[in-house]
Image (cartoon, rainbow, N blue to C red):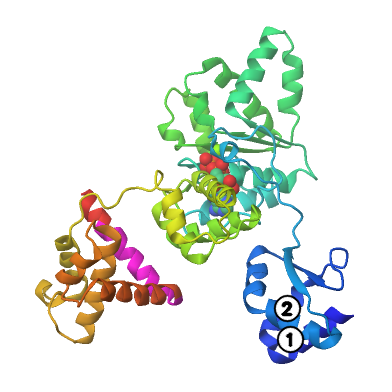
Amino acid sequence: MLFDKIKESLKSENQVNYNKIIKKLEFDEEQSNSSKIVIKAPNIYIANYIKRKYAHKILELYKKETGIEAIIEITTKTVKPKTYSTEEILTNSAPSVLIPEYTFESFIVGPSNQFAYTAAKTVAHNPGKSYNPLFIYGGVGLGKTHLLQAIGNYLKTKLKVLYVTSEQFMNEFREHVRNHTMDIFHEKYRNCDCLLIDDVQFFSGKEQTQEEFFHTFNELYSQQKQICLSSDRPPKKLNDLVDRLRSRFEAGLIVDIQPPELETKIEIIRKKCEINGIYLPEEVIEFIATKLNDNIREIEGMIVKLNAMAKLLGIRDITRDFAKQALKEHIKDKKENITLEDIIELIAKEFNIKPSEITSKSRNQNIVAARRTAIYLAREFTKESTPTIAKYFGLKDHSAVSHAIKSFNKKLEKDNNFRIKIEELKNKIQLKKGE
Ligand code: ADP
Ligand code: MG
């Protein structure tokens, strides 16, 4: 086939890229015709890479073979992903059913959630026999529901899994009491193999529901059925919870999920883009990761919003500036009260030099690096204009500042370790101001 031949030629040019990328491309016979080649890529990132680096080449090779000047279209192989509206994503309430997308595979693991992830997986592989109950707690939008549901999705084909929020449990309980149908309620909750109850903090103060849940718990527990719970705080801190229920919650394994570190956050955003069929350049992904807060649900909502706005405005390439503008209401304003002096002070300490050296004309390597970093931070964190920054740091003019920042950004893009170091500095400067 012609496309195979084209792939072969590309293979001989670059074996590594072939194995990593080209091999995975598929020719879309149905959508193609003699003057239009449609190629399916496994995901949006590869699709964009091919557009940039290979589209031209493929057309050239095609022309060589057929003499036809064709056009090319790169699509993604994934079946149209289920897209959620911003509102759907932003509602804080947990879903009422198992959502198939919430799996262990789609969960990004980092130091902040490693423990919870491993515990959840262990439970899924060995229900009722490893940790019972498993109690996951953590802040809003950090993945508690996702992990609970991942356990459910993993087990649902083999076992009777029941996923409910504590509120659903309570409402059902009340309704069955009212209708005198408690036997149906018991049948449902005491005959499952794995009970997942989300957001148990809402049990607080609901004594009758707690009482009922206590019995449900004991019944399941004595039969070695798995129970998993999530909450926004640890059992110890759950107010108005009867002690015997608290001690049940504490009897198994308690794990927490912490806010994600930058690297994890970036990975999660990448994953969410992929799932939602959205392409964002790296600089935008990093911008979102650093400027928005840690609630992943909110971040996901913003990604969808950004994409929707770009579509609406007919913008094809979402840039950092576009993101900044589009999300400005959601960005924590960090420029409030950080001054050039604050930056100089921090950088001098970090680079172990005198503050005056930063603004001097010295060409000493360490000082130059410090100066560049300070200029970058000044642009990021202060309200000062580029001419002011130029003057302050003894640069020729504002374009020298822009130039310095551009090359700094390039380095950030290329050098992972460097980027992390700079992120740490950024955190420090904000912390300092927050003190
Ligand atoms: P919580 O129940 O803790 O409030 P959710 O489990 O509902 O949070 O997570 C909010 C959103 O963030 C979901 O879309 C979820 O898939 C996503 N999410 C959170 N943590 C991760 C992660 N580590 N990897 C992938 N997605 C995540
Ligand atoms: Mg939740």
Percent x, y for residue 114?
A: 52, 56
**236 left or right of 401?**
right
Give the residues drawn in magenta, as a range. 414-429
The residue indicated by pointer 1 is: 10
Residue 136 drawn above or below residue 262: above
Q: Residue at x 45, y 60 (%)?
A: 320
Residue 229 in the figure: left or right of residue 391:
right
Indicate the position of residue 33 as horizontal and vertical percent values: 86, 69
Outermost residue to the bottom: 12
Give amino acid for label 2.
Ile
Contact, mark 2 vs mark 1 (Cβ under 8 Å): yes
Look at the picture and state if 208 lies above or below 396: above
Asked where in the image residue 412 lies, by quadrant, the reply is bottom left
Q: Position of residue 197 (x, y in %)?
A: 61, 33
Q: Nearer the viewer, residue 318 or 264?
A: 318
| SS at badge 1 | helix
| Crowding near the residue tagged with mark 2, few <14, some 14–19, many ≥20 C-alpha atoms within 10 Å | many
- Marked residue nearer the N-terminal end (2 or 1): 1
| Local secondary structure at mark 2 | helix
Q: Main secondary structure of the magenta part?
A: helix
Instruction: Reply yes or no: does residue 65 show up in magenta.
Output: no
Distance CA(mark 2)–CA(mark 1):
8 Å
**Residue 241 position (above or below residue 12):** above
